[in-house]
Image (cartoon, helix red, strand yellow):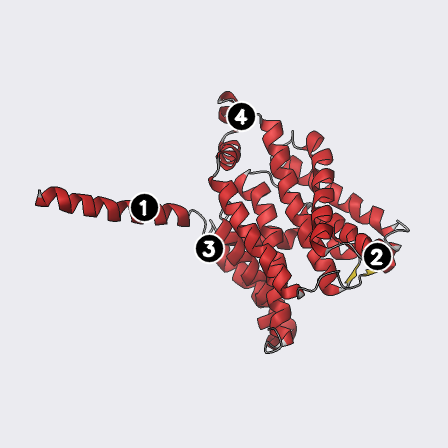
């Protein structure tokens, strides 16, 4: 099924699928809940190493269970670290998450089980499904899940926290519980994305999950539009594919890449799809169509 696709294009598509999963996890934390996190790469790394170690130590474990375990491990770490630090907001929270990410990276660089600075060679997963199919199946499930979460009662509570924490608390929303749940679920997606990343590349190193990795994921969310599920998908797709399609410019490609980001932020500060609700537009269109039909009947009567 995948034999007719250029391997280079296939690699870009897989990277886009993994980036979508990671960006949607961060969008839930930063875009929907309003908690600025600069440590998303840390939870990606915990998921990547957990998934790699499961494959190395227990090669017969199905890949789906492997990814589930990696995601749950990242969510558990996020819940434990989130309880004390999510009482902070704004720049203070960003600094704490950044510090935590650096701690995780240094710990992995000095642990024997992660092979220290040499990193781990990850064998193929125990699955007969091709990795591109696996990645995009999970990416689509993530898009659907995040869309439902955003429009659910839980999602409305998260948006209330983002808009005004004092008002949200006055309305009976438990800030600590909702923040931790959002942080844990976003980190769960980061862990799943890390597991996919580890098995797709076949090699991981703690240095791959540094500060700039978190910044890249934050750029995807900001470019697409904070709080927008479709925006995170578009932002992840553009920022993953852009460096590859600009390779013909050799050493100038990153200069053009940065200039494009600056121009987009100047002329579209809310992101490409910031403020655009596709579900709202669809409901409005359906509502107008229904009203038009009813109105026509009323006039005829």
Give the class, few, some or many, for how many residues have Cα within 10 Å of label 4's Cα (few <14, many ≥20): some
The residue indicated by pointer 2 is 56
Residue 120 lies in what quarter of the image? bottom right
Q: Residue at left 51%, top 37%? A: 155
SS for callout 4:
loop
- Residue 277 in view here: no
Disc 4/disc 3 C-alpha distance (Å)? 31 Å
The residue indicated by pointer 3 is 272
The residue indicated by pointer 1 is 284
Q: Indicate whether 153 appears above or below 193.
A: above
Q: Nearer the viewer, mark 2 or mark 1?
A: 2
Q: Are marks 1 and 3 in contact (CB under 8 Å)?
A: no
SS for callout 2:
helix
Does 132 sit left or right of 261 as displayed?
right
Q: Nearer the viewer, mark 4 or mark 3?
A: 4
Disc 2/disc 1 C-alpha distance (Å)? 51 Å
Does 167 sit left or right of 82 as displayed?
left
Give the class, few, some or many, for how many residues have Cα within 10 Å of label 3's Cα (few <14, many ≥20): many
Disc 1/disc 4 C-alpha distance (Å)? 29 Å
Disc 1/disc 3 C-alpha distance (Å)? 21 Å
The residue indicated by pointer 4 is 173
Q: Are marks 4 and 3 in contact (CB under 8 Å)?
A: no
């Amino acid at each position: 099924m995948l034999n007719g696709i250029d391997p280079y294009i296939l690699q870009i598509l897989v990277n886009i699928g993994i980036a979508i999963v990671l960006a949607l996890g961060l969008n839930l934390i930063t875009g929907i809940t309003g908690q600025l996190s600069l440590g998303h790469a840390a939870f990606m790394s915990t998921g990547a190493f957990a998934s790699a170690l499961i494959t190395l130590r227990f090669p017969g474990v199905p890949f789906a269970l492997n990814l589930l375990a990696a995601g749950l491990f990242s969510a558990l770490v996020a819940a434990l670290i989130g309880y004390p630090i999510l009482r902070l907001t704004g720049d203070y929270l960003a600094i704490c998450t950044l510090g935590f990410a650096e701690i995780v990276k240094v710990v992995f660089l000095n642990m024997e089980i992660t092979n220290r600075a040499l990193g781990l060679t990850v064998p193929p997963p125990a699955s007969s499904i091709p990795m591109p199919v696996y990645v995009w199946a999970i990416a689509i499930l993530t898009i659907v899940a995040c869309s439902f979460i955003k429009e659910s009662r839980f999602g409305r509570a998260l948006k209330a926290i983002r808009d005004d924490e004092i008002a949200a608390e006055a309305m009976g929303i438990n800030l600590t519980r909702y923040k931790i749940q959002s942080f844990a679920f976003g980190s769960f997606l980061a862990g799943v994305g890390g597991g996919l990343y580890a098995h797709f590349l076949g090699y991981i190193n703690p240095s791959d999950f540094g500060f700039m990795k978190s910044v890249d994921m934050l750029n995807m969310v900001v470019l697409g539009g904070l709080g927008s599920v479709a925006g995170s998908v578009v932002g992840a797709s553009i920022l993953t594919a852009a460096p590859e399609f600009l390779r013909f410019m050799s050493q100038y490609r990153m200069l053009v890449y940065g200039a494009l980001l600056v121009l987009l932020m100047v002329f579209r500060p809310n992101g490409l799809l910031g403020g655009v609700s596709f579900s709202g537009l669809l409901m409005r269109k359906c509502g107008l169509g229904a009203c038009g039909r009813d109105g026509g009947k009323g006039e005829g009567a």
